[in-house]
Image: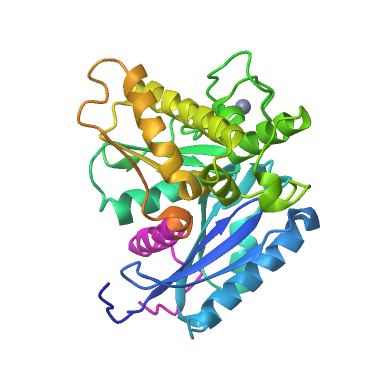
Amino acid sequence: MQSTPTKPPFYLGIDLGGTKILAGVFDSQLKLIGTYKVSTKASRGPSGVLGRILRCIEDAIDECDLKMNQISAIGIGAPGSVNSGKGVVNFAPNLGWRGIPLAGNLSKKLNAPVFLGNDCSVSMLGVYHVELKSKPANALGLFIGTGIGGGLVIGGEPYRGFTGCAGEIGHMVIDRSGPLCGCGNRGCFEALASRNALFNSIRKAVEQGKKTQLHEILGRDLKDMRSGDLRKAIRRGDRLVNRLVREAAEAIGLAVSNLANVLGPEVVILGGGVIEALEHEMLPTIIRTARKHAMPGALTGVEIKASVLGDHAGITGAAYLARAELQAHRSKAHNTLHSSGNA
Ligand SMILES: [Zn+2]
């Protein structure tokens, strides 16, 4: 890879998840300079998590030999429903948050503009604008992690719908008699194919006496299971894990075929921690199932692939959001937070 010198102004992208916080420092061209990661510790409540976000930011900046006053703007993707205009996290079940003014609180502490978005919408910004260079006009992203979320780009613009909830693909009901979902429905896509769903079905099978190589990898207790452990188990010939991962991949393929029938995307991008860890195990099944179930012609010429940004989609999209919103605010001359102007 060719290394080009980093150029100010700098932007910070934060991916706030239920289990970890990842911060990335980017230059003016959104080239990643450095990252820092801490665990979220959501049980400590909003103010505890806010403190951990601040520490993560400080350490990420320090890793890059920069200072806070060299950061022009900060973008943050948070799980759940958010009000981007007000910078408020409305409801984040993974964090146990309701009505938290996250952007305002961070902005006050850091004396810099902070812009907030839903984590999957933000990841899609990173994938679409940085990885796909803002092409083609219609793109669909599926992010398979702890939960499942989607990102839609229609006509070159992020699509959020009338209520702002568009893209909640994790709660499409795929199997009405399937496992119970956190939202109260049965057989939601998320209840069939997310990391939590996979881990739950593995634990349940083990309780029923099914054998797995995971015990050799993790010991008796499967409490600290990670997606990468499933890959290791499959490579050791674990038939249980192989079957459950294949079933999850089939559910993802079904979701892709349904969404392709409705939306007609030109490209379908798969991201999130589960895909990053199990791309080679899952992608062929996802593509085969999607092509088998889509309407004839609906997926002709449509590319279905894994995001190369992987776990960095969230921070990249958050940095893109920070840069785009800052430019928009400046052009509207609404920027009252950061009047020194270091661009
Ligand atoms: Zn659901």
Image vertical order of residue 262 relative to residue 33, above or below: above
Residue at the spot 44% in from the left edge and 80% down from the top edge: 340
Residue at the spot 46% in from the left edge and 26% down from the top edge: 250
The quarter of the rendered structure image containing the C terminus is: bottom left
Residue 125 visible to an observer of this rendering: yes
Number of marks drawn: 0
Image vertical order of residue 8 relative to residue 237, above or below: below
Image vertical order of residue 30 relative to residue 231, above or below: below
- Please state the horizontal and vertical placement of residue 102, each as a whole percent of the image: 63, 57
- Please state the horizontal and vertical placement of residue 194, each as a whole percent of the image: 57, 36
Image vertical order of residue 163 relative to residue 313, above or below: above
Q: Nearer the viewer, residue 212 or 173?
A: 212
Ligand number 1: quarter of image: top right
- Please state the horizontal and vertical placement of residue 270, each as a whole percent of the image: 41, 41
Residue at the spot 48% in from the left edge and 42% down from the top edge: 143
Which stretch did the figure color magenta? Answer: 316-343
Among the 4 quarters of the image, the one containing residue 153: top left
Residue at the spot 32% in from the left edge and 42% down from the top edge: 157
From this viewpoint, which residue is outermost toward the front? 237
- Please state the horizontal and vertical placement of residue 215, each as a whole percent of the image: 71, 46
Residue 151 visible to an observer of this rendering: no
Compared across the picture, whether 27 is left or right of 181 comes to left
Compared across the picture, whether 116 is left or right of 97 comes to left
The quarter of the rendered structure image containing the N terminus is: bottom left
Q: Is residue 174 magenta?
A: no
Q: Nearer the viewer, residue 235 or 137?
A: 235
